[in-house]
Structures are given as C-alpha cells and as structure tokens.
Image (cartoon, helix red, strand yellow):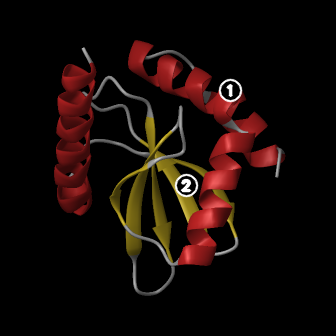
Amino acid sequence: MEEIQIILQELQQLLASADLKNHSKSKGFQILIAKKSDLKFRMEPDHHQRAHIHIQYGKESHKATFAIDTGELLAGDLPAYQQRVATKWISDHSEPLNRLWTTLKQGENHGPIISELQGDD
C-alpha cells in the first residue's frame, strides 16, 4: 500500500510539473485568490483530484505549485523566504482553500469564498 502512495505522489508531482510548464499557454480560466507582497496566489479548476494552488512571484516570474492539504511544494520553485510565506499562508487558509477547490470543481458560485480569502490577510 505504501508503494502505491509513493507512485501516486510521484505521478501527482509529474502532472503538477506539466501543468506548471503549460500554465502560461492555458486557455482555461484561473482565479486570482490573493496577493501578499509580491506573491500572487491563483487557482484554476483543472482535472487533478488533489487540491493545489499556483503561486507566482516577482519580476523573474518564479512559479510554483503547492498542495493545499500539506503545503508541500509539488512543482516549480520560489526563493526560500517567499516559499515560507506561501506555505504559511496556505496553512493558515487551508479550510477556505479546500472549500474553494470543491466549489470550483462543482461549478458553483465562488465569489463569497474569494472575498473571504482576500479579506483575511
């Protein structure tokens, strides 16, 4: 069973990495959830089962994808300080981020959750 979990995690990381590479080419919509300093937190209703968030940083356009449930870096990179800020923000907001993920997947109104996340820094 543990071997299956490892394989699934590796697959998730590969898929997240592929999404990250194709992110700028995506024709789908994405939602700016919050801005904190130079970090932009975005989510898009994609085909993955594991809830995750995309983060962009600075003029160099660092990009990274983090799991919402663990704050784990799935793909990409951020400078160390920005990664700490991002993982803390995700940890502090995991409940509304999970609700937002579910709402987007179901195609429901996500406006109130976005307002909650943007107003709760």
Residue 16 x %, y %: 26, 46
Question: Nearest the camera: 30 or 39?
Answer: 39
Query: Which residue is pictured at 51% across the width and 78% down the height?
Result: 79
Q: Is residue 7 left or right of residue 63?
A: left
Tell me if residue 108 comes above or below residue 27 in the rendering: above
Query: On residue 49, which mark appears?
Result: none
Q: Is residue 115 left or right of residue 17?
A: right
Tell me if residue 96 comes above or below residue 16 in the rendering: above
Query: On residue 95, which mark appears?
Result: 1
Q: Amino acid at mark 1?
A: Glu
Residues at discs 2 and 1 in contact (Cβ within 8 Å): no
Work out which residue is located at the far right of the displayed protein and give it. Answer: 120
State how far apart marks 2 and 1 are (Cα): 15 Å
Q: How many marks?
A: 2
> Is residue 107 among the parts visible in the rendering?
yes
Which element type, helix, strand or loop, lies under badge 2?
strand
Question: Nearest the camera: 57 or 26?
Answer: 57
Q: Amino acid at mark 2?
A: Phe
Residue 46 x %, y %: 29, 32
Query: Which residue is pictured at 63% across the width and 76% down the height?
Result: 81
**Quarter the N terminus occupies:** top left
Query: On residue 41, which mark appears?
Result: 2
Quadrant of residue 4 in the image? top left
- Mark 2 crowd level (few <14, some 14–19, many ≥20, 10 Å Cα): many
Residue 62 x %, y %: 40, 75
Which element type, helix, strand or loop, lies under badge 1?
helix
Work out which residue is located at the far bottom of the displayed protein and give it. Answer: 59
Look at discs 2 and 1 and give the one toward the viewer: 1
- Mark 1 crowd level (few <14, some 14–19, many ≥20, 10 Å Cα): few
Q: Earlier in the sequence, mark 2 or mark 1?
A: 2
> Is residue 25 among the parts visible in the rendering?
no
Q: Is residue 95 left or right of residue 82?
A: right
